[in-house]
Image (tube, helix red, strand yellow):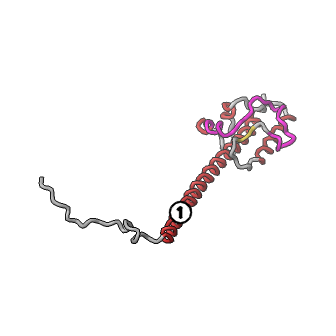
């Protein structure tokens, strides 16, 4: 193979000699511009990441609220139907709230991760006097705090059960 000589003109580096280098002020301004651009991009990316994180936490809190509300409604119906506090998640599967929002086996797995229920209680040990002190059913954080009305309804059901005999 015959090699052809390189006939292209050599490319000269415009900054090879000190005489052709940009003035120091111009280099400094270029450095500042690149720095400002990099910081601006970092801020925009950071803001976008934080916005996504807030949205994800909000969705998780909404799911926990729905799970908490469904659990409270189901326990309320269980107390109405069976006259006692549920002993397990399996007991809650048997309850059929009037709204039709019963807990399916698939939902039950997720709800167990989002809501804590104290199944060791009985109706007599549940404090019905103060809804703010109610700890028998608690959401795992994060959770929006819009389920107090369900707690009050459950406590009213429990208080009514204290005056009625258990269904037999």
> Residue 164 placed where, x, y %?
85, 34
Q: Residue furthest front?
A: 18
Q: Is residue 133 magenta?
A: yes
Does residue 119 lie above or below 8 as drawn? Answer: above
Tell me where the magenta segment starts and ends, as one range. 108-134
Does residue 43 lie above or below 60 as drawn? Answer: below
Viewer-closest of 91 and 143:
143
Viewer-closest of 70 and 80:
70
Which quadrant would residue 100 be assigned to in this image?
Answer: top right
Q: Residue furthest left?
A: 1
Q: Residue at x 60, y 56 (%)?
A: 51
Q: Residue at x 77, y 32 (%)?
A: 85
Q: Quadrant of the C terminus?
A: top right
Q: Is residue 14 magenta?
A: no
Q: How many marks?
A: 1
Does residue 118 lie above or below 155 as drawn? Answer: above
Q: Is residue 4 left or right of residue 102?
A: left
> Residue 147 placed where, x, y %?
74, 47
- Crowd class of label 1 (few under 14; some 14 to 19; many from 20; radius 10 Å): few
Viewer-closest of 76 and 144:
144
Q: Which residue is mark 1?
A: 35
Q: Secondary structure at mark 1?
A: helix
Which quadrant would residue 128 be assigned to in this image?
Answer: top right
Q: Is residue 22 left or right of residue 66?
A: left
> Residue 17 placed where, x, y %?
38, 67
Q: Is residue 15 left or right of residue 134?
A: left
> Residue 114 placed where, x, y %?
66, 40
């Amino acid at each position: 193979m015959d090699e052809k000589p390189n006939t292209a003109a050599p490319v000269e580096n415009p900054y090879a000699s000190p005489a052709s280098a940009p003035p120091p002020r111009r280099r400094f301004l270029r450095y500042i511009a690149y720095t400002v651009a990099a910081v601006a991009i970092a801020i925009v990316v950071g803001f976008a990441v934080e916005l996504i994180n807030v949205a994800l936490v909000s969705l998780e809190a909404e799911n926990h609220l729905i799970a908490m509300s469904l659990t409270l409604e189901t326990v309320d119906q269980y107390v109405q139907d069976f006259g006692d506090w549920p002993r397990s998640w399996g007991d809650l599967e048997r309850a059929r709230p009037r709204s039709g929002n019963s807990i399916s086996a698939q939902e039950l797995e997720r709800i167990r991760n989002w809501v804590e229920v104290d199944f060791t209680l009985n109706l007599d040990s549940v404090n019905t006097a103060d809804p703010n002190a109610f700890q028998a059913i608690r959401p795992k954080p994060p959770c929006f705090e819009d389920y107090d009305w369900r707690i009050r309804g459950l406590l009213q059901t429990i208080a009514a059960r204290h005056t009625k005999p258990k269904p037999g």
